[in-house]
Amino acid sequence: MARFLKTREHSNGAAPGSVIFLGRKKTEKTTFRLMRFNVEGVSDMQNVKKEQLQHLSTDSVNWINVYGLHDVEKIKTIGALFSIPHLILEDVVNTDHRPKIVEFDGGLLIIVKAFFYNNDDKKIHTDQISFVVGANYLICFQEKSNDYFNPVRQRIQENIGRIRRSGHDYLLYALIDTLIDNTLVLLEKIGNNIEALESHIPRAEQKLALTIYQYKNEITYLRKSVRPYKEIVYALSHSSQSIITDETQPYVDDLYELINQTIDATEVYYSMVQDQLSLYNTYVNNKANEIMKFLTMFASIFIPLTFLAGIYGTNFDYLPELHFKYSYFIMWGVMCVVAAVMLVYFKIKRWI
């Protein structure tokens, strides 16, 4: 399946608001996880039933994880429980969606991408993560169960920082901040590999061009999904839904600076691989020019020598010096002098 654009055969011609899954099935079944916490304690329940989600506590933060987006009936069930419009659910199950933020009556939808490096095919892949935030809940829709948010869960369990004393807005900030941090870590690893290529460029090996081109594709893929983060964070801090409280606002502002740093790093490495490709092509062209220079010089020396040999190799009876005893050696001497004079001339002209 293509990474940059996924097939839309199943949704072609469908009515707006049709909840149709687009993407690749990444988990066997769709499951729910509920984590509730406040200053006093934490409750973490996995594989919860929909009945357990009907009556959420109003004096705690309710973090619901939905793992697996392919079971649209279960997605619709969640939508019905929390009065999420079908247009929002349509975006949630479309894993090819561009990262964005959408306000709707009583809530907020944020679609982002989480990145991971696949060691098998040496490529960057993404999981789409959608956050739906309401008055007393935060639902996190994920394509599969993974460890992206384990650091946040650990902070909640161990009561580190202010997360247990804050609301859903701070939890939202913490989750997005974790995704951006993961992106920076991934970008740093790829960046180190890109920078290491510079020392190999002068050798101009053929396989190096393919390596540089592969990194160019990976950075392009990363760049495509990172840049919209800036719009999301800006819109989040200026949302009319009043999701972000005054206490959390400084952290969102700091998040804006962090995503700017990530975007800047992405642009730097994108420019770097572009320059490396250009530099590689320059070295290849210079190498070819050196070869052509040698061949041209070689041909230039032998053109007059071939001319001399052609004249004295003609089959005429009356050819000057034909029967002279030392004609052969004189001809070799003339040819060597001509070749030497041409080499000296090339040296004076700095052609060699």
Image: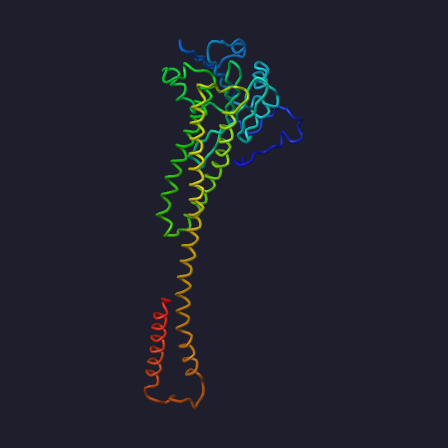
Q: Residue at x 39, y 42 (%)?
A: 194
The N terminus, quarter of image: top right
What's the residue at 40%, 62% (across, down)?
Answer: 291
Residue 274 against residue 231 in the figure, above or below: below
User: Which one is in front, 328 or 145?
Assistant: 145
Tell me the quarter of the image containing the C terminus. bottom left
Residue 44 appears at what percent x and percent y? 43, 13
Residue nearer the viewer, 154 or 233: 233
The furthest residue to the front: 246
Question: Where residue 329 sits in the image (x, y, percent)?
Answer: 32, 82
Is residue 253 rendered to the left or right of residue 135?
A: left
Above or below, 238 relative to 308: above
Where residue 350 sits in the image (x, y, percent)? 36, 67
Could you tell me which residue is drawn at 49 percent across and 9 percent down? Answer: 58
Q: Nearer the viewer, residue 303 or 230?
A: 230
Q: Is residue 45 above or below residue 212?
A: above
Q: Position of residue 188 (x, y in %)?
A: 38, 35
Asked whether residue 18 appears in the rendered view, the answer is: yes
Residue 213 picture quarter: top left
Residue 143 in sight here: no
The quadrant holding residue 106 is top right
